[in-house]
Image (tube, coloured by chain):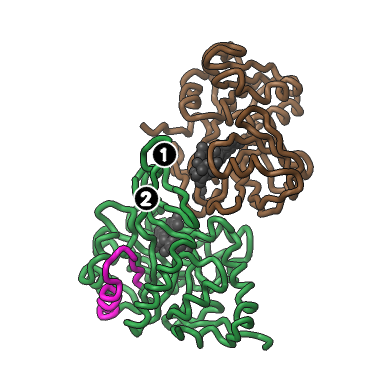
Chain colours: A green, B brown
Amino acid sequence: MGSVNTKVTLCGIEMDNPIIPASGTFGFGYEFAELYDINCLGTFSFKGTTKDPRFGNPTPRIAECYAGMINAVGLQNPGVEKVISEELPRLAKCFHKPVMANVSGFAIEDYAYTCEKLDKEDQVGWLEVNVSCPNVHGGGMSFGTQPEAAAAVTRAVKAVTKKPVIIKLSPNVTDIVSIAKACEEAGADGISLINTLLGMRINLNTRKPVIANKMGGFSGPAIFPVAVRMVYQVAHAVKIPVVGMGGVSSAEDVIELMLAGATAVEVGAANLVNPFACRDIINDLPRVMEKYRIQSLSEIIGQA
Amino acid sequence: MKQGIFEIKSNIALTATVYKMVLVGDTSDVTAPGQFVNILLDGLFLRRPISVNDCVGDELILIYKVVGKGTEQMAKMTAGQTLDVLTGLGNGYDLSKAGDRPLLIGGGVGVPPLYMLARQLREAGKEVSVILGFNTKDEVFCEADFKALGCDTTVTTVDGSYGVKGFVTNALPESYTYFYTCGPEPMLKAVYKATVTDGQFSFEERMGCGFGACMGCSCKTVTGNKRICKEGPVLTKEDIIWEA
Ligand SMILES: Cc1cc2nc3c(=O)[nH]c(=O)nc-3n(C[C@H](O)[C@H](O)[C@H](O)COP(=O)(O)OP(=O)(O)OC[C@H]3O[C@@H](n4cnc5c(N)ncnc54)[C@H](O)[C@@H]3O)c2cc1C
Ligand SMILES: Cc1cc2nc3c(=O)[nH]c(=O)nc-3n(C[C@H](O)[C@H](O)[C@H](O)COP(=O)(O)O)c2cc1C
Ligand code: FES
């Protein structure tokens, strides 16, 4: 079959391939840039950025699960000012494509503040607005669990930026479709999902929760079927593009999520275990495409 | 950091629960004592961090205690089997501060990383004192290795069944130029209080990645937030903030 076409277009921006390291699992890219040329990526979503600097939750923040992990990092980041003054210039040296800026907040004004700042940065291609982080008390979670609140964040962000706005949804809801639709109606340019599932582990020796914060976000291969289901539901209900994620660790998984309706695919926890995971998936895509007789990836989006 | 496949050369028990594994592979990224490696194991999602006990040529030596599924699996492995290992993780100890008569203080499985440090300090002509703390006689390991390097080596046991009775802090020498320590956190706190010079402490934390990507292992220090896996595991005495 010769050369296959891995290009996709996400909210008007063409990407060499649909592979995007997921926010929180790729830092600001440098650790990985030491290992391989990260320009092979479609793009990547940088660490969840907030208005003010955050240390995050106490440690332990990590627990292991079958085929996955729980994290309760709590959005540790240097705050949007430092992200712009320090991280982005450093990133510019090793990454030459539009990057996806992941934004979190605890009030609608925070989201707008952070997005307005990032809107002015040429390096930023997309804004991925996380209304779902389950780690922070009284924070992110509530926006993503109510259609009106998610829509309010969407409107506030859309009002301050011309860049495509992708709303990142929480799977910890009863009706994902109604929330996705509310965001679409509020002007979202895309939807990404799924964020982590709320989970918990208990240490039998200490008889206490493993994680200091008690609960955290469960991700990794174990959640892949949930991701496929939710991407499928949302992609069939909205007209805007969907970025799929949750447990992806192989080129086959990427194709499965695209068949479910994803235009692009994020890879999270897999990067932490195999730092070369995204590069390996990208290198393997042509082989798997040929195996399943796929000439162009963009043709299979939502075929299932 | 490098990812490599290492072949097990040997894997022997030192005590009822502590094993020594010699691996062979590309060790070129192991640049300082006190660094660690992160090991992928069958059926377990997260890698397991283990300190470098020593590294000579293409041999990487690890000493680990069996405490759960991952270390149990390691203990069952035999020569010829292979492991996927990330090497060159963490900052490691800074030897330049040692002075002429550095003191090394290790407790339990905090003892292993001090060996490579002691060897390099001895090679640099330093007079090295070592205090190794254990709970009881049956748990003592590595004593002969430090003695063979020519270190002035003292063992303490909590129950007094071997060496000096009590904690490592019961055996501190009168004078030393600097100190290096690794062990359980209560020991590190006691060492922090009992020592009279500057020094370096190696910390442990639950890790997601081990190479700085996930922010799973962060701690606050005097000079700002640090990742135990990247800006650590070794922190200087003056940099440490003890959490309540
Ligand atoms: C930088 C560093 C260096 C270390 N060096 C050594 C060493 O040289 N020798 C040695 O015996 N042990 C060392 N440890 C501790 C070792 O990593 C744990 O004992 C080991 O991961 C336990 O795995 P398990 O599957 O047997 O236990 P399980 O309890 O089944 O592990 C479950 C999860 O908890 C994590 N975990 C459990 N105990 C610890 C711990 N004490 N610290 C961090 N994570 C933990 C595991 O990595 C895993 O993700 C080190 C830890 C760190 C962070
Ligand atoms: C350690 C860690 C930190 C994360 N931090 C963020 C974050 O800051 N912002 C965000 O939107 N999602 C964050 N996530 C969620 C991931 O981006 C992703 O949605 C989720 O982990 C599911 O993908 P996976 O199963 O491939 O990991 C984090 C996940 C992990 C494991
Ligand atoms: S363990 Fe991931 S940043 Fe340290």
Above or below B92: residue A275: below
**In this rendering, the label closer to the viewer, 2 or 1:** 1
User: Where is the N terminus of chain A found, in terms of image quarters?
Assistant: bottom right
Query: Of the residues shown, which amino acid type is indicated by label 2?
Result: Met
Residue picked out by circle 2: A200
Describe the element under mark 1 as helix, strand or loop: loop
Residue drawn where x is 36% and y is 31% of the image: B244
Q: Which chain carries label 1?
A: A
Q: What residue is shown at x 58% (from left), y 59% (from top)? A: A32
Of helix, strand and loop, which one carries label 2? strand
Q: Give the range drawn in magenta.
A: A167-187
Q: Which amino acid does label 1 sit on?
A: Leu
Q: Give residue A167's mark.
A: none
What residue is disc 1 on? A204
Q: Quadrant of residue A289?
A: bottom right
Q: Specify few, some or many for label 2: CA neighbours under 10 Å numbering under 14, 14-19, or 20 or more.
A: many
Quarter containing the C terminus of chain A? bottom left
- Going by the picture, which residue comes out furthest to the left? A148
